[in-house]
């Protein structure tokens, strides 16, 4: 059968391989004349240098000049013109017939227990348990988008109103989206902020200040989107810090595209991560705990950063994580056998069959 076709972006394609249907914002190109109820062939774009690296959403299929991979068949939920006119809503429902679909047969979860749950990968959910949030803690999630770990922290303290969870990200768009998610979930103990976490610590320590007072300070301006305009904190402000910085993401699966082409490009992530670490250690109270995690299998970004923290900041100590054992940490990055046993490394090749992930826990 000769089906008309559509092409979604790479992130949408990866979501489809995890069981998702296709939503309008993920569609890049489509054949003319597609109607609601029509069965179409679905492809995912693989980024490459075409059209100066830019693909305009709404292309007709004959205008597409990129590379793509077949995902399966789907049923259109609306006409073609509505797909590119709308900003929200489902565009295509993927077939649940194993003959019509690539990848594992996983059910879509959109709309299931909405405002009551958020799906997380198994290793990611260990972060909240490792940091062990308690009532009355002041907690900072330095790179929180899309908000899964932050929500998990709130759920672990039962959204206690004496717990303050400050959730930050550099992208205002992502923070606004997370804010809507937090409100929908009823997580009132979370304060979302837009700031650069590589430069968020006031140089001069003011140990008597209270973040709780700052949170409720009427002097802190509020933007039109309801976000408080707080950009920096005093040193020693937080009891616990969750640091999951931008990384090479080599552990994510399924993965249709790897942006890094050589070792030098990977090392750029390491230098960027060290900037987050430096700020986190300043902001953490003495006796406080900091988790460090990534979704990559690159040792320089994992064991290498742990070694960097221990060598550069003598006031930081690595502590064991009370979680099930994982794959052994990598040798060759300056960690002792005892220290390698303290961290948790997950690899897609391991028998646990998870995504690639790394987690370490420190105390100041």
Image (cartoon, rainbow, N blue to C red):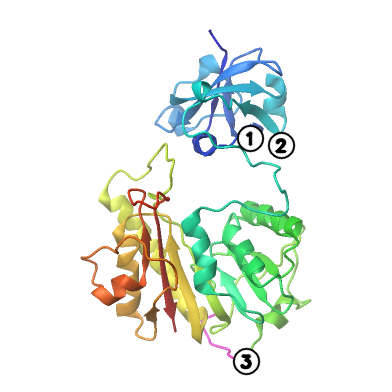
Residue 25: mark: 1
Residue corresponding to mark 3 = 208
Q: Nearest the camera: 295 or 202?
A: 295
Residue corresponding to mark 2 = 88
Closer to the N terminus: mark 2 or mark 1?
1
Closer to the N terminus: mark 1 or mark 3?
1
Q: Nearest the camera: 77 or 54?
A: 77
Q: Which residues are magenta?
A: 202-208
Secondary structure found at label 2: loop
Residue 139 visible at all = yes
Q: Residues within 10 Å of mark 2 (few under 14, many from 20)?
A: few
Residue 122 vertical placement versus 9 (above, below): below
Instruction: Give left or right: position of 149 versus 300.
Output: right
Residue 205 lies in the magenta stretch: yes
Residue 111 image-quadrant placement = top right
Closer to the N terminus: mark 2 or mark 3?
2
Residue 197 visible at all = no
Instruction: Give left or right: position of 349 versus 75.
Output: left
State the quadrant of the C terminus.
bottom left
């Amino acid at each position: 059968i000769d089906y008309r076709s559509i092409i979604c972006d790479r992130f949408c394609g990866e979501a489809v391989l995890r069981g998702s249907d296709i939503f309008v914002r993920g569609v890049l190109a489509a054949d003319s004349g597609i109607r609601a109820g029509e069965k179409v062939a679905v492809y995912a774009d693989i980024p490459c240098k075409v059209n100066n690296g830019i693909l305009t959403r709404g292309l007709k299929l004959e205008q597409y000049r990129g590379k793509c991979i077949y995902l399966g068949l789907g049923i259109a939920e609306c006409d073609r013109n509505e797909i590119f006119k709308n900003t929200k809503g489902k565009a295509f429902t993927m077939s649940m017939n194993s003959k019509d679909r690539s990848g594992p047969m996983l059910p879509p979860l959109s709309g299931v227990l909405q405002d009551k749950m958020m799906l997380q990968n198994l290793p990611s959910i260990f972060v909240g348990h490792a940091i062990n949030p308690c009532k009355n803690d002041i907690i900072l999630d330095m790179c929180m988008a899309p908000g899964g770990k932050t929500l998990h922290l709130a759920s672990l303290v039962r959204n206690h109103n004496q717990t303050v969870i400050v959730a930050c990200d550099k992208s205002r768009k992502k923070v606004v989206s997370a804010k809507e998610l937090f409100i929908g979930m009823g997580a009132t103990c979370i304060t979302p902020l837009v700031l650069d976490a590589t430069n968020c610590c006031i140089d001069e320590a003011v140990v008597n200040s209270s973040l709780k007072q700052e949170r409720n300070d009427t002097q802190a301006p509020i933007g039109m989107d309801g976000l408080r305009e707080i950009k920096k904190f005093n040193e020693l402000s937080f009891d616990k810090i969750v640091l999951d910085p931008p990384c090479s993401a080599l552990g994510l699966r399924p993965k249709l595209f790897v942006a890094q082409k050589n070792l030098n490009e990977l090392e750029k992530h390491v230098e960027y991560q060290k900037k987050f670490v430096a700020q986190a250690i300043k902001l953490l109270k003495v006796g406080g705990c900091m988790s460090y995690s990534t979704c990559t299998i690159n040792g320089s970004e994992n064991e290498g950063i742990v070694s960097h923290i221990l060598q550069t900041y003598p006031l930081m100590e690595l502590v064991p994580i009370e979680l099930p054992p994982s794959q052994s940490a990598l040798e060759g990055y300056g960690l002792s056998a005892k220290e390698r046993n303290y961290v948790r490394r997950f690899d897609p090749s391991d028998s646990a069959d998870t995504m690639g992930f790394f987690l370490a826990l420190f105390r100041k």
